[in-house]
Amino acid sequence: MKKILQHLFEHKTLTREQAKDTLVQISKGAYSDTEVSSFITVFLMRSITIEELQGFRDALHELCIPVDLKGLDAIDVVGTGGDGKNTFNISTLSCFIIAGAGQPVAKHGNYGASTISGASNVMEQLGYKFKSDTKVLHQEVETAGICFLHAPQFHPALKAVGPIRKNLGMRTFFNMLGPLVNPVKPPYQLIGVYNLEMARIYAYLLQQDTKAFTIIHGLDGYDEISLTGDTKVIDQHGERIMSAEQLGKRSVLASDLYGGNTVEEAAKLFLKILSAEGSWAQHAVVVANAAMGLYCTGKYGEYDQCYQMALESLESGKALGALQQLLALQP
């Protein structure tokens, strides 16, 4: 590691192979916490290159415990996190709305590293048991329309650096990797990113895959459709800017998206919104993100049709039903 660190401290970058090998060694516990912290810190001080990100992604894919959902064409809706906005769990709520609308979901997530409540925090608080058994996960999708994959269960490298990331308490390149390494390798992905440079890198990487993807970035700094301003939307067909009115019928205030001070508060708010008892603004935001997820698949018509499907899923109780069915399956 000392050679790698010296190389990086000289303002040099890693090749794809060097990046892959370094992360493989980290996952095997070959380096001390201090060395790993120093390595991560380098990428807090400069932008990651596409080659480096590809190498890190290669390592996680190679080491990953794969999950085969046997023909269930699932979508993942995930944000990179790290936007510092302390919003409620918009992506995870959107996943249940999508599942309630009839589209299978394989949600990949982790504990919050720079936020109070990440997807894994809220799912655990609600009573979901993390697991890596493919048969059980397949059964969850078949019955409830959704399963949840806690990233460290499938990625040894993420497990190895979890405490270090938590201690750093800020966005790292691992935030960028999470959305790229879902062990299901779902054919559809909606990914929220917190800046335009990352959107460009993701677009480059995802265009090399065969899956349908949509990348979203709230132009005022959100890693999701926030409806607080315009949203940049990038997919395999090109890119465009969409207004809050186009996406959610109206704009909302940043204060409408507040996620609470504790995991317990976040979970209560999650249930309130999923029960269609949240504010109009909260509903509009989760429905807009769910609609973009449905639209990403190309199976449900134009965006406005997808918005109506998502709204019906939330207001009819189907979205809440997906959560209830999923929790009923837990051991």
Image (tube, rainbow, N blue to C red):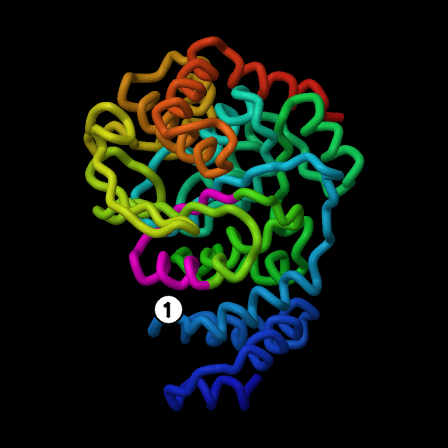
Instruction: Indicate the quadrant where residue 170 lies.
Output: bottom left
* Residue under the point 52% across and 74% down: 34
Give the image location of residue 97, x and y in percent.
Answer: 48, 24
Residue 86 higher or lower than 260, as above or below: below
Crowding at mark 1 (Cα within 10 Å: few <14, some 14-19, many 20+)? some
Question: Per the image, is 196 magenta?
Answer: yes
Instruction: Indicate the quadrant where residue 41 lies.
Output: bottom left
* Residue under the point 41% across and 75% down: 42
Give the camera-side residue of 172 and 90. 90
Callout 1: SS: helix
Residue behind mark 1? 44
* Residue under the point 43% across and 59% down: 202
Q: Quadrant of the N terminus?
A: bottom right
Under mark 1, the amino acid is: Leu
Give the image location of residue 173, x and y in percent.
Answer: 45, 63
Span of residues in magenta: 189-204
Left or right? Give the position of 79 relative to 212: left
Residue 16 higher or lower than 94, as above or below: below
* Residue under the point 54% across and 46% down: 110
Instruction: Indicate the quadrant where residue 245 lies.
Output: top left
Question: Per the image, is 296 magenta?
Answer: no
Give the image location of residue 269, x and y in percent.
Answer: 40, 23
